[in-house]
Amino acid sequence: MNATSFLTFFLLILCSCISCKKAPSETKQVMLWQSYDETQEIEAQQAHESNRMKFKLIQSRYRDKNDVFQPLYEAVAAFSEERYAQLAPMVLEQDIPSLQQHISRGDLTYEELTLFYLKRIYTYELDPATSLHTIMALNPLVLEQARARDKNKHDKKHPIYGMPILLKDNITTATMNATAGAAVLEHTSNEKDAFLVSQLEANGALILGKVNLSEWAYYFCSGCPLGYSALGGQTLNPYGRKIFETGGSSAGSGTSVAANYAVAAVGTETAGSIISPSSQNSLVGLKPTVGVISRSGIVPISHTLDTPGPMAKNVTDAAILLDAMRGKDAKDPSSIASSSSYILQKKNNDLSGKRLGVINGLLSDTIYAASIKQLESRGAILVPFDPPQVPLDGFLSLLNLEMKQDLPVYLREYTSIADTLPSLEAIMTYNAKDSTLRMPYGQGIFDAIMNDTIDTKGLDLLRSRLLTNGNRYFQEPMQQYQLDAILSINNYHSAYAAVGLHPCLAVPMGYKTSGEPIALTLISSPYTEASLLELGYAVEQILNARKIPRAYKD
């Protein structure tokens, strides 16, 4: 029985046992997900060569998945396997323009597109053998909203219209709590949307749900697994469940899009948290210049470095998603107003005359070396160089001190817990009261934050020095060799790009002999996202590397 058959059979049996006229309180008792004994699974994991992959748990010990999946299960059960099979070739791995063309021709509707993705989510996430533990919440109104998009599709003005999008669960929405994966934020009430969510909805996007992440955006526990959170459990990589890391902290954004659970997802990054999971999941991920997309309504680490960004299966979709989120936000001092669109205009694979910086220290990677040769064969001018030696001393102190400052502000404006838990120190005390459930890997980074003491003047000097050094690291070779971009691997140079405020674009480059994905990362000057995306599109067409995960191809 294939995965889709499994879900259909399971839900039909379930529906036959429960009358649709049952009271809501009775329906809530139905179990779609049954927790299982994972003792042997965890014991086997201790043999993994990476300490971060030696999991203590996989299923969340805190949250019941049934709370997430029950509200929409009847609608998903009613979506037939036959219709799913008809739509699969039109949806799987297709870009947004192709999807919109199919809908314009009447081949499917926005409601059916949404149901298609929900069918995949229910099929794979409710089977212990395939669950990626990546879905944190589903929008209970999404099908109603999809029907409204169908009814009003003559109003479509942006290509994101009607496209189901997933959000990292540190992005605030009025309909679903932003938890950052933390137990303390599970039941906070909120009636606000993050600015980027308002922009997406204004452009007609459908917010399908929320996805797992490394708890507190991987600024919580020291040396713990990427993609772990108390509420979501352990996110797993579709290219190798329990074998390859998911990347972090936007682990769920990466794994869910890689498995075709949505058109695209929004991640967030302080230093590497979009680029890392995009690389690990064979996706296109863009870390934009700070301010290109508003940060208001996002659980913060650092107001200097934090930024959201698009994660998609191709550059075309990443550009469309970026464009749909842009806009000046008065609440975010770094926010900019962009007068031009980020949607791709040229769309060619000609690199003639493009000067691309090649970091000498990376040439020992055979996939990198082969990939840049492919680019050279299509007209790119490769310029090998050695980056300047500049320190990033104090980088963690910048994050420590700004999180200590910024988190209480977020708690006051976007949560209902600020009166009782107003600070990082109070949250640490809350966690310690039930450490097994709330912090099984400890809270070592929180400890370090509390022990870091630099005064305001020292922090200002630190911030300025890091910006100078980050700029020098990239701008010195860019100006000396007149480079259009610098080519890196995965998130190898994300810290320098973060402090220097340089945008990064990860593009699938191939797979290691083990099957683990690897990305070519293009880094360009601040506020050059439009030209970076055009360049990335050409690179993507030449390398043509992305493949759907084998276990999630049906």
Image (cartoon, rainbow, N blue to C red):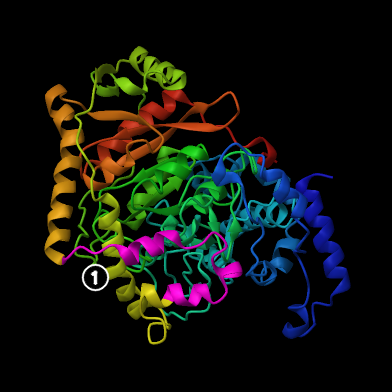
Residue 512 lies in quadrant: top right
- SS for callout 1: loop
Q: Main secondary structure of the magenta part?
A: helix
**Residue 309 location (% of width, % of height):** 37, 51
Quarter of the image that includes the C terminus:
top right
Res. 414 image quadrant = bottom left
Q: Residues within 10 Å of mark 1 (few under 14, many from 20)?
A: few
Q: Which residue is mark 1?
A: 331
Task: State the residue in front, 393 or 288.
Answer: 393
Q: Which residues are magenta?
A: 427-455
Q: Nearer the viewer, residue 334 or 425?
A: 425
Q: Position of residue 482 (x, y in %)?
A: 15, 25
User: Which quadrant holds residue 406?
Assistant: bottom left
Q: Percent x, y for residue 369?
A: 40, 17
| In-image side of 80 versus 252 (left or right) | right
Relative height, residue 135 to residue 500 (above, below): below
Q: Which kind of residue does numbered mark 1 sit on?
A: Lys
> Residue, x 26% and y 61% (percent of image)?
303
Instruction: Give left or right: position of 478 versus 247.
Output: left
Q: Estimate the x, y position of residue 373 in percent, counting from the top left.
A: 38, 14
Q: Is residue 350 visible?
A: no
Q: Is 434 one of the magenta-colored residues?
A: yes
Nearest the camera: 24 or 109? 24
Q: Is residue 264 above or below residue 452?
A: above
Q: Is residue 397 magenta?
A: no
Left or right: residue 10 versus residue 497 is: right
